[in-house]
Amino acid sequence: MHAKEIIKKLNNALDAACREYFIKDLAGLPFPETADLGFCVARDERHGDLSSNTAMRLASSAKRPPQDIAKALIPIFRTYVERSGLISYVKETEFKGGFLNVRFSDAYFRDLMIMVKRSGRDYGRSTSGSGKKVNIEFVSANPTGPLTIAHARQAAIGDALARILRYSGYEVTCEYYLNDCGRQINLLGKSVEVRYRNLFGIEESMPEDGYRGEYIVDMAKEVRKRHGERFLKGGPEAEGFFRKFSVSQQMADITKDLEDFGVKFDVWTSQGAIEARHEVENALLELTRKGFIYDSEGAKWFASSRLGDDKDRVVRKSDGAYTYLAPDIAYHRDKYLRGFDRLIDLLGPDHHGYINRMKAAVQALGHDAKSLDILIVQLVSLFRGGEQVRMSTRKAEFISLREILDELGKDVSRYCFLSRRLDSHLDFDIEVAKKESMDNPVYYVQYAHARICSIMKYSRKKRFALLFTPIKLDLLAEARERKLMRRIAEFPFVVESAQEALEPNRLVVYLNELAGEFHSFYTDCRVVSDDPRLTKARLFLVDLVRIVLTNGLGLLNVTMPEKM
């Protein structure tokens, strides 16, 4: 039986005990049906393995102090636990510090370890999202330059979220929205054209808002290499060529950088294609029919304030041009038409004001606002030896994903980008991240995996002594062994928590803690010893740590080295 199933049964037993208490001891006082009375995994082992603030939550309705409620509840609860067949798993039930705490028995941890071993790669997997289709859109950088570290953080988070949701049973589509038309694309093409002409000695100034990075010169050189002087005369043909060529080159670079970062998209959606299919007009027509579009001052307005936005928004200006909101509404409408039940957008910190207007648009289109999650991913600041890195080595006003990959590699970069809540600003030091020491978080976790592989390899030298030795898991009675088993038991709940909160950093925190518990265990408990029975039991335990590290790092798309 999985730990989550056991806790579900214990929650049912607690609920039944509370109801019986209200009926028999409280003369039928109204039971608080909306109260959350379940157990949660206790973070502090001093509070047992499971903990619940049930007694405190019931105090107001029961008109009794929490300690009196707990005193009455515990024997009733244990009766229901016995009826459920789980009494062998519950060692102790106590009321301490305002909480009802449960400690599991040795039998629970023994059966848990057997279940983890049998589950292997599926330990932590669930079917909670079965039958639900989710679209995650992330990165979606305009193809006007290389991906920056801000985009890299989005890429790491979006990819990890997709993996966690798939592991939880969801059908997930990762999507990149390509803004391949409009003023910025025109400026990109013009910027490359100017640099191309400059290469031939023609003095021509860059447009005021043009792109000035070294990558623009690189593209201009590539045009000269392929086409020589063909486009020096300019004109409509040249403008069209430079616009198309520049976008193509940038998308090739973006795709390569993302692939090297371990990120692949299932769908690439072009804004130009959406507009060519008249989807923007269709979306506005639908909103007009539903009474959410009105005319004022020669423009068309979306009445978003009726649905929670702070003010109405222009979707079509008086000159007939669409605002950026109009194609975004059409794009989200297209996602729903493709059958997605839930949409998740990862956006930069300058998009806070975007949340309410898009949720209003979703509601106006006939969908639940809760079906759209807009996650704001904060920026990244890099440091080198304590000094902030302010300029790219490519002499542009950004630090690119490619630079980070070249210096740190995929694993270190991803782990660093995933280490904090996505809505928290992230600072990390390149020099610390490059160290192969316990100060480096990803090294700390990967080294735990490599150390286990080394232990298992070394144990093969004693294969004849161990071959006919039965596994006696009840020999694992040391405090360090129990802490390690307890931490292993938490993994499915951490995955569930990361999935529900859309916060992959929770897995990073957990893996660091698991690695810490393992390193402490390894220091205090000799795994391969002259005692074959204890050796066999401890080898079984460390292999479970390997399974959990493999599953957890796999969800973050970080490799598991066998030696370091």
Image: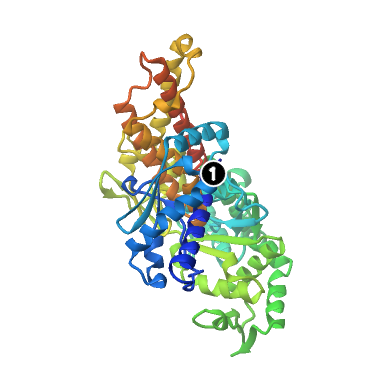
Against 23, residue 242 (above or below) is above
Against 164, residue 374 (above or below) is below
Q: Position of residue 413 (x, y in %)?
A: 42, 43
The answer to whether residue 155 of the structure is visible from this angle is: no
Pick the residue in front: 52 or 390: 52
Residue 494 falls left or right of residue 55: right
Name the residue at 53% across, 51% down. 8
Q: Position of residue 520 (x, y in %)?
A: 31, 32
Residue 240 falls left or right of residue 183: right
Against 296, residue 222 (above or below) is above
Pick the residue in front: 352 or 493: 493
Q: Position of residue 276 (x, y in %)?
A: 72, 66
User: Label 1: few (<14), some or many (≥20) within 10 Å?
Assistant: few
Query: Which residue is tagged 1?
Result: 85
Q: Position of residue 441 (x, y in %)?
A: 36, 40
User: The N terminus appears in which quarter of the rendering?
Assistant: top right
How are the residues colored?
rainbow
Pick the residue in front: 317 or 70: 70
Name the residue at 42% across, 18% down. 533
The answer to whether residue 561 of the structure is visible from this angle is: yes
- At mark 1, the secondary structure is loop
User: The C terminus appears in which quarter of the rendering?
Assistant: top left
Q: Amino acid at mark 1?
A: Gly
Against 350, residue 471 (above or below) is above
Name the residue at 62% across, 82% down. 319
Q: Quadrant of residue 72?
A: bottom left
